[in-house]
Amino acid sequence: MPEGHTLHRLAGQIERAFGGRRVRVSSPQGRFSEAAALLDGARIEGAEAWGKHLFVEFAGERFVHIHLGLIGALDLHDGLDSDAAVPPPVGQVRLRLVTVDDAATGQDDVAYADLRGAIICALVTPEQREATLAKSGPDPLRADADPDRAWDRIRRSNRPIGALLMDQSVLAGVGNVYRAEVLFRHRMHPMRPGKTLRRGQWQAIWDDLVELMAEGVESGRIDTVRPEHTPEAMGRQPRRDDHGGEVYVYRRTGQPCLVCERPVRTAALEGRNLFWCARCQPTFRSRAVG
C-alpha cells in the first residue's frame, strides 16, 4: 500500500498539472459515471493529502476523495503538446481527468490522469471530507500537524509501538516501510508497549518521520540509511527491490544487519510483517519494581 509520502507527491503533481484549469472528467470503467458527469468541465482548485487520503478539490467546494488501497494507482501525464492526442484508456480506469484549453489561464498544453484500482473514489462534500479527517491522526508531512495528538494516544496504550505507528487513527501516513525503519533508527523494539515510551523518545521519532517522509516526497522513494551505511560508504551492492530505496531492515529477513551483521528478523503483528534487528533493537525490559 502506498505510504503517505506518495499521496503528498501526487497532490503536488495534480496541483502543478491541473490546478486552476478546467478538465474533462469521465469514468471509462463506469463506476464513477454519475459523479463524473457532475464534475465534467469544472475547474480544479487544488489537491491535498492527509495521510493515505487524497482530496482533489473542484470549483463549488466539491471534493473527489481517493484512497489507493493495496493496488490502486494514479498515473499522471503532463506537459504534452496542445495538438497531442490523449490515448484511449487502458484497463479498468475508474476516473480520467483531461485538461481543456483555457484562455483564462493561457495554458494550452495537455495533461491527463488515470485512476485505477483505488478502494475509494467518491465525490464528497466539505462536511464529509472533514469527517474523514477527524478520524485520522496527525500527518508528519502537514504543517498543521500536532504530534501531541498522537502522543496522547501512545502514552496511554498497552499496544506495541509497532502497531500504534501503523494505526491511521493514531498517526496518518506511516506504512510498513517507515514503521520498520524509524524504529530501527531509534533502536526501539517494535513490540515495546506504547505507554513505556518517554515523551522525548516520541518527539525524536516524530521529528525523524517528518524529515524522512519529506525526503520521500522529493525523491519518490524511501531511503532511510544514514550516510555511513549507503552502498558507496560500505562498498556493498545497492538494494534491489520493487519498493526501491536503501533501508535497514524492511524486507531484509535473514540478511545481515547493516550495523551489527546479525540476521534481520521478521514476525507478524496485526496482520502485517514486522522487521527488526534483535541486537540493535533489544527487547524492552521495564525497570519498574513490582
Image (cartoon, grey):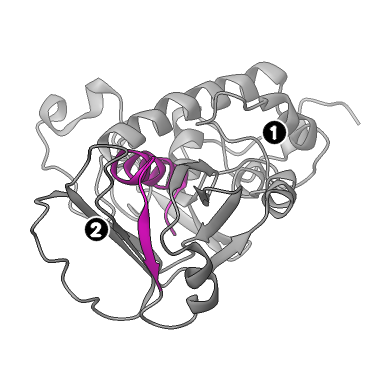
Location of residue 235 in the rendering, given as x and y in whole percent from the top left corner: 9, 31
In front: mark 2 or mark 1?
2
30 on left or right of 102: right
Q: Secondary structure at mark 2?
A: loop
Please provide the residue range marked out in magenta: 1-26
Distance from label 2 to label 1 (Cα)?
36 Å
Q: Give the percent coordinates (x, y) of residue 58.
A: 51, 50
Q: Quarter-wise, where is residue 46 in the image?
A: top left
**Quarter of the image with the N terminus in it:** bottom left
Residue 224 in sight from this viewpoint: no
Expressed as whole percent of the image width and height from the top left, the position of residue 84 reads 9, 60
Quarter holding the C terminus? top right
Q: Earlier in the sequence, mark 2 or mark 1?
A: 2
User: Residue 100: which disc?
Assistant: none
- Look at the image and say whether residue 106 sits in the magenta stretch: no
Q: Residue furthest front?
A: 103
- Residue at (72%, 37%) from the top-left corner? 194
Which residue is tagged 2?
242
Question: The disc labelled 1 sits on which kind of residue?
Answer: Arg
SS of the residue at dot 1?
loop
